[in-house]
Image (spheres, rainbow, N blue to C red):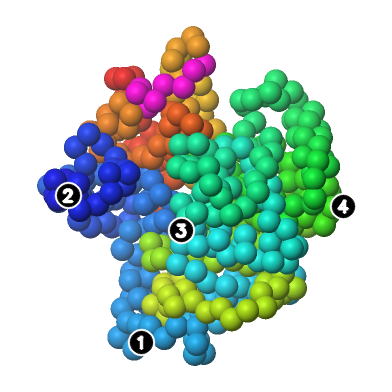
Amino acid sequence: MYDRHRAVLPRWLALYYDDPIELSHGEGRYVWDTEGNRYLDFFGGILTTMTAHALPEVTRAVGEQAGRLVHSSTLYLNRPMIELAERIAALSGIPDARVFFTTSGTEATDTALLLATAHRGSPQILAMRNSYHGRSFSSVGITGNSAWSPTGLSPLQTLYVHGGVRTRGPYADLTDDRFIEACVADLEDLIGQGRPPAALIAEPIQGVGGFTSPPDGLYAAFREVLDRHGVLWISDEVQTGWGRTGDHFWGWQAHDRNGPPDLVTFAKGIANGMSVGGVVARAGIMDSIDANSISTFGGSPVTMAAGLANLSYLLEHDLQGNARRVGGLLIERLRGITAGLPSVREVRGRGLMIGIEIVRPGTGLADPAATAAVLEAARAGGLLVGRGGGHDSSVLRIAPPLTLTVAEAEEGAAVLEQALREV
């Protein structure tokens, strides 16, 4: 299968593991490969299988809708799309909200950028250093992580702001309050150097960047500056949305002192693996587009049915609360087992969004080779985790489905402890 993959797919389509695995099926928090090996899934298809593998409520909703109508496009009234839009608009915190559905987080970013630049009449975007927003031409152009930015060409003018990484960079040694002050000053300076930008786009917790985040309140402080200059705030909730951080339903709510963002992008977990993304925005912004536009596959009746069933399950079973409780226990457990390991610089995160940063002992320098070795050792122990982190991919990314139990958290932590000590 690996040979067939390499024969017909691009060489830049990355695969995990020296001996890549083919997954055959899953149930709950576990998946199986085609050789019969079972793994505890601590990555959920890059935070996309948010609730559980083969969740009956979602698979049943998909099957029932597929038996009625698979596709119609946005040219016709679409009951599942309207119902899911109503629920997301109400949950968004954005007044007079409108929702547009896409098929991915990348397409959601594209849409948000189109809306912001059209509304403001400016091609300039502020983005965070170490950020990631997708793989399209426009989203790559605002990504502040060189490992995921294959071209310097862009349809946008992008300026990068400090603040997304708390424990590295020129402000790392400051207190939280001083850190925020320094980042706000940097933002003021950037905006003051040219015409006002269209928007600032930011992940409340940087996903591909290694689950890094600023102190709570940074984006609220940014909002004061942005409002003075008429600059919009786009919160990229593709990875942080739907309660994964435990403390909040949306990541931006850790920065809500000055109100909600103007636009929110979402994707990944909302439909538990079905391809759904989208943008929520104030009506005045969403309606800025003055040309015809539709979505062929965004808002598909089948994916909308999956989103409705999954969102209902998430809310009815308080999976945000579970992420807070079990995630908090898992973070403390991981901090305990890594406390004496000189190769672990930091365990960080919130809820079930946790990063373990691997370094060369005594130097603080990233160690991608050791990180890859831990990834392999964890797989051998029956655990799947992710990888990311700045320009060096030296962070283990842990993001299990939000139904994770305490026993499963302990199981995964034990495998990680063994893997870290082996390496």
Instruction: Check if residue 352 falls in the magenta segment.
Output: no
* Residue placed under numbered mark 2 in the picture: 7
C-alpha gap between disc 4 and disc 2: 54 Å
SS class, disc 4: helix
The picture quadrant where one finds residue 61 is: bottom left
Name the secondary structure under disc 2. Answer: helix
Question: Alpha-carbon neighbours of circle 3 within 10 Å: few (<14), some, or many (≥20)?
Answer: many
Q: Is residue 298 above or below residue 15?
A: below
**Numbered disc total:** 4
Q: Which residues are magenta?
A: 364-371
Between disc 2 and disc 3, the foreground one is 2
The residue singled out by tag 1 in the image is 69
**Mark 1–mark 4 distance (CA, rounded to whole Å):** 48 Å
Mark sitting on residue 228: 4
Which amino acid does the dot numbered 4 rest on?
Answer: Arg
Amino acid type at circle 1 is: Leu
> Quick one: which residue is furthest to the top in this view?
362
Residue 227 in percent (x, y) is at 83, 54
Point 28% across, 44% down: residue: 11
Measure the alpha-carbon separation of dots 4 and 3: 33 Å
Q: Secondary structure at mark 1?
A: loop
| Occupied quadrant, residue 65 | bottom left
Q: Callout 1: few (<14), some (14-19), or many (20+) C-alpha neighbours within 10 Å?
A: few
- Residue 164 shows in the view: yes
Q: Which tag is nearer the camera, tag 4 or tag 2?
A: 2
Residue topped by disc 3? 268
